[in-house]
Image (tube, rainbow, N blue to C red):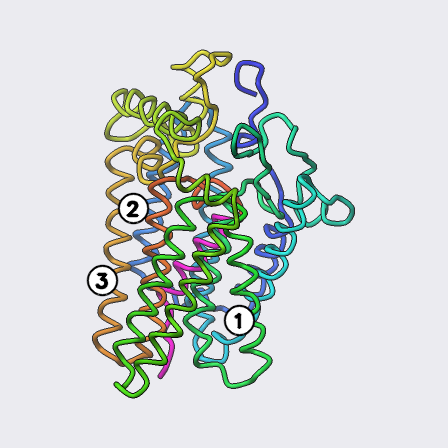
Amino acid sequence: MVSGIQVDYLSPTLYVTDILVALLFIFFLGEKRYKKISSFSFVLLSIFILFLLFTIFRSHNIFNGLYHLLKFVECAFVAFYVSTTITTQQQIKHLVSLFSFGILFEAFLAICQFIAQGSLGGLLYFLGERTFTSQTPGIANASLDGQLVLRPYATFSHPNVLAGFLLICMVFVLFQVISQKYLWQKALSLTSLLLGTAGLLLTMSRGAIVIWFLLLIIIFFIQLKQVSRQQRQSKVLFIIGVLFVFLVMLIFAKPVGIRLLHTNLSEESIVQRETLVSASGQLLQKSPFFGVGFGNFLPSLATIQKPLSVITYLQPVHNIFLLVLVETGAVGFGFLLGFVIKTYAHLFLVIRSKVYNPKIFIVYCILLTIMLVLGFIDHYWLTLQQGQLLFAVILGLCWTKIST
């Protein structure tokens, strides 16, 4: 509770995925795979955890900070587990199939929710679907021609999180379609890409939609340059046809078209982001070196805003870099920046060395870049369960060693 207002971000929650990760950790200890951790990495991680504890014990809400620290350790383990487990091309193919099924399920559910303009209920509640309609207070709607239209959630906590999930999974699947040998695998992947694109459009999450279409256009023109002159004419016709289909989809998908073409700086989502950025600046001035405390952005935010004010938004700032900077100060931000630079350096080194499969690491580099770009306009990679786990998986994949 913050000044009498219940805030979900501050509610300690046990997810089914937490139980699965805990079981995975038990098997991990039994296999003694922790011996693969280098001494330098272990010491560096230990120092960073001690630093986070230091920021927590000088914060407004110690228990909330400790809960977030536990989530950080959980995600760090997931990333390490993935980095030491995904070591063959066959495992990558299994991941593609799993992501494809995930896309199909979430996209189909999103389409059904959009048609019904509300949740479907039943057993889906136990898979994470919230109970809502387009009239539910605080629900994510889009104003189209003066009418509020529900943006589907599927089993996620917000349409933007659903969009981020669909985008990352579709990019992963897209780059693996060509290498698939079996017809059923290609059919599954292509179907998931088509249905996933429809689901992505209905989320009306502008950042994810723009990135997806830009990526498709870039890929098509790269493929065009790689074909022979004899095949170029048919390739041009194919590209024109695909772009025409996407253009028609945007035109006839009225909600998406209106939302993309009528963006203005006075709408609530932009004003909300500006307000939170301004509040972040105030918090950062109070403690620029060590921050307000890990996991303590919201408790600290409540101290500088009136809880019942119209411009109050009790949620994290929509920028993961600014969020880390405010909570852990310049020191914690330095750790984050160093790790990101180190990850990119590792990816570029592997790609150039060609010791391992360079193509898959190019895909990982693209996925990481997309996540960081989305992280500039939203916070779910660091604050929500599904975003945290997916971010951990992609980071883990960036550090894998896939043989050629």
| Left or right side of 129 for 333 | left
Where residue 277 appears, as percent x and y from the top left, is 33, 27
Where residue 96 appears, as percent x and y from the top left, is 51, 70
| Left or right side of 125 for 308 | left
CA separation, marks 1 and 2? 36 Å
**Pointer 3 or 2: first along the chain:** 2
Marking on residue 345: 3
Q: Nearer the viewer, residue 163 or 386?
A: 163
Neighbours of disc 1 within 10 Å: few (<14), some (14-19), many (20+): some
The N terminus lies in which quarter of the figure? top right
Magenta range: 387-404
Check disc 1 and report its element: helix, strand or loop. helix
Q: Which residue is mark 2?
A: 336
**Pointer 1 or 3: first along the chain:** 1
Whether residue 403 appears in magenta in the rendering, the answer is: yes
**Pointer 1 or 2: first along the chain:** 1
Marking on residue 190: 1
- The answer to whether residue 74 is visible is no
Q: Nearer the viewer, residue 61 or 362?
A: 362
Where residue 355 appears, as percent x and y from the top left, is 27, 81
Camera-nearest label, 1 or 3: 1
Amino acid of disc 2: Leu
Whether label 1 touches label 3, CB < 8 Å? no
- Residue 128 vertical position relative to residue 272 in the rendered view, above or below: below
Please give the name of the residue rendered at 36% of the width and 38% of the height, measured from the top-left corner. Answer: 52
Amino acid of disc 3: Ala
- Residue 278 vertical position relative to residue 37 in the rendered view, above or below: above
CA separation, marks 1 and 3? 32 Å
Quadrant in the rendering for residue 261: top left
- The answer to whether residue 79 is visible is yes
